[in-house]
Image (spheres, coloured by chain):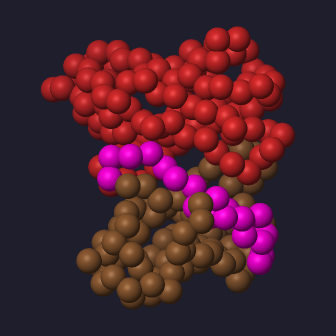
Chain colours: A red, B brown
Amino acid sequence: AQTVTQSQPEMSVQEAETVTLSCTYDTSESDYYLFWYKQPPSRQMILVIRQEAYKQQNATENRFSVNFQKAAKSFSLKISDSQLGDAAMYFCAYRSILTGNQFYFGTGTSLTVIP
Amino acid sequence: SQTIHQWPATLVQPVGSPLSLECTVEGTSNPNLYWYRQAAGRGLQLLFYSVGIGQISSEVPQNLSASRPQDRQFILSSKKLLLSDSGFYLCAWDLVSGTQYFGPGTRLLVL
């Protein structure tokens, strides 16, 4: 089974600064999706960004961008110009295209934004 | 646009009582549906998923069960709740496009 590892249980960043959250995964497949989800105190899971493995270009959504290193099986999330509303739990997730139905989630990184 | 609903939002139940949590999706057809549980400060544990009406796959053997009586309705049930069933329950849906979308969740406290 695929595994997703988030090695940083907690991170903090000063407001307006940049922070990078790490994620590595283990797979023998070549085609898959990777995701970052945000879970604020309300606990609803919100999609932040998605990356298709066949795309070499790193995905970007406003202040959020990823560094996708397929050979290294690494998928980090960079948050630029951090805002207080970015404080949340962040989960990295993997989904196989071939076997389809199951998502594999990391254990999460709790991000604190310091005013 | 698609929306996903869960209810109730919060539930406090005594040990040994039954459980029924409901999830419905609007604005899409034949979605894959999922039930996850999340303990406080922890990651997500996949409980059940369904690719169609009446088709349920169980990932974790336990005293919970799931049913899908309609295309866009997914129900999580228990005949007798345990203390260990307390947690935050999330329903999610997706299509073959790959992105999974989550409902607002149900907080369950078993006393």
Is-magenta flag for residue B42?
yes
**Taking the image as drawn, is residue B49 in sight?**
yes
Q: In which quarter of the image is residue B43?
A: top left
Q: In this view, does B64 lie above or below B47?
A: below
Q: How many tags in the picture?
A: 0
Picture residue at 52% right of the left edge, 24% below the top:
A23
Quadrant containing the C terminus of chain A in the rendered view:
top left
Q: In this view, does A99 lie to the left or right of B72?
A: right
Residue B67 x/y as whole percent? 66, 78
- Near-viewer residue (B102 or B62): B62
Residue drawn at (73%, 51%), measured in percent from left and top?
Answer: A101
* Residue B75, horizontal then vertical, whole percent: 59, 77
Q: Quadrant of the N terminus of chain A?
A: top right
Where residue B41 sits: x, y (%)?
33, 46
Q: Give the range drawn in magenta.
A: B40-59
Q: In this view, does B29 lie to the left or right of A108?
A: right
Q: Which residue is drawn at 53% across and 75% down?
A: B63
Give the percent coordinates (x, y) of residue A73.
64, 18
Quadrant assignment, res A72: top right
The answer to whether B74 is drawn above or below residue B38 in the figure is: below
| Residue A28 inside the magenta-drawn segment | no
The residue nearer to you, when weighing A99 against B94, is: A99
**Residue B9, visible in the rendered structure:** no
User: Which residue occupies 64% across, 45% down?
Assistant: A103
Decide whether the magenta segment is chiefly helix, strand or loop.
strand
